[in-house]
Amino acid sequence: MASPHYPEGTVRALLQTELVTEATRAALLSRLDTSPYTPQFFDEGTYELLRAVAARIYPQPERAEPIELAPVVDKRLAEGDSDGWRYDAMPPDREAYRLGLGGINQAAQALFQLPFQQLPEAQQDQVMEVIANGTAPGENWQQLPINRFFEELLAELTEAYYSHPLAQEEIGYVGMADVPGWTHIEPNQLEPREPEAVKE
């Protein structure tokens, strides 16, 4: 039996209702814009490297047009935004990304003698595996704690993915439609605007 999923268009339909505030609607609709993105912080090569890394952390083979995650990171760094804190072992975010992405390329070169983007997906996955488990070769990891960098990278890409309306439709998330509040708070109780999973 196929696993349950949520009706396509759930979030996009809700965005057109009065259940969503104007500010939230504008933010989510902007994430549906698929216009080509020009990097503002990274140079073109580093930006394409980030796109390739994001595609291995969040592969989306079922999508004709994958959700782009790299623009979220690039915009944040260009604007100088941050969470307002960082681990004391970590440099500022812009430097951390410069070192971390460079370290991913160094690991690819050490393991397979090619830049990350030129590797087939299976080898890219192997590179990301040694990054994730903290054993990647590369001089940049002498300046940047690899485990912390991967933790930050994973967290930022995860937030970017699940803040996108199409990803929210996948998991049936309609929390942005909160103008009337939430009254059905017992387990397995749904508000009328919450989707029920469709079983195939």
Image (cartoon, rainbow, N blue to C red):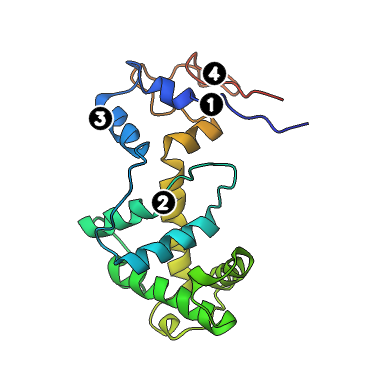
Tags 3 and 4 touching, CB below 8 Å: no
At 43% from the left and 59% from the top, the residue drawn is 51
Distance, label 2 to label 1, CA atoms, is 21 Å
For marks 2 and 1, the one nearer the N-term is 1
Mark 1: few, some, or many residues within 10 Å (few <14, many ≥20)? few
Is 189 placed above or below 3 here? above
The mark nearer the N terminus, 3 or 1, is 1
Estimate the spatial distance between the alpha carbons at disc 2 and disc 4, rounded to whole Å: 30 Å
Q: What amino acid type should be assigned to the residue bearing mark 1?
A: Glu
Disc number placed over residue 8 in the picture, else none: 1
Question: Does residue 43 appear in the picture of this structure?
Answer: yes
Would residue 87 be visible to someone looking at this image?
no
Q: Nearer the viewer, mark 3 or mark 4?
A: 3
The answer to whether 74 appears left or right of 126 in the picture is left
Q: Which quadrant: the N terminus?
A: top right
| Residue at the image point whose x is 58% and y is 80% from the top | 112
User: In this rendering, which labeled residue sits more in front, label 3 or label 2?
Assistant: 2
- Residue linked to disc 3: 23
Q: CA distance from mark 3 to mark 2?
A: 21 Å
Residue receiving disc 4: 190
Residue type at tag 3: Ala
Spatial separation of the CA atoms under disc 4 and disc 1:
18 Å
Residue at x 73% of width, y 32% of height:
2
Q: Is residue 117 above or below residue 174?
A: below
The kind of residue tagged 4 is Leu
Q: Residue 57 in the image: x percent, y percent? A: 53, 57
Which element type, helix, strand or loop, lies under badge 4? loop
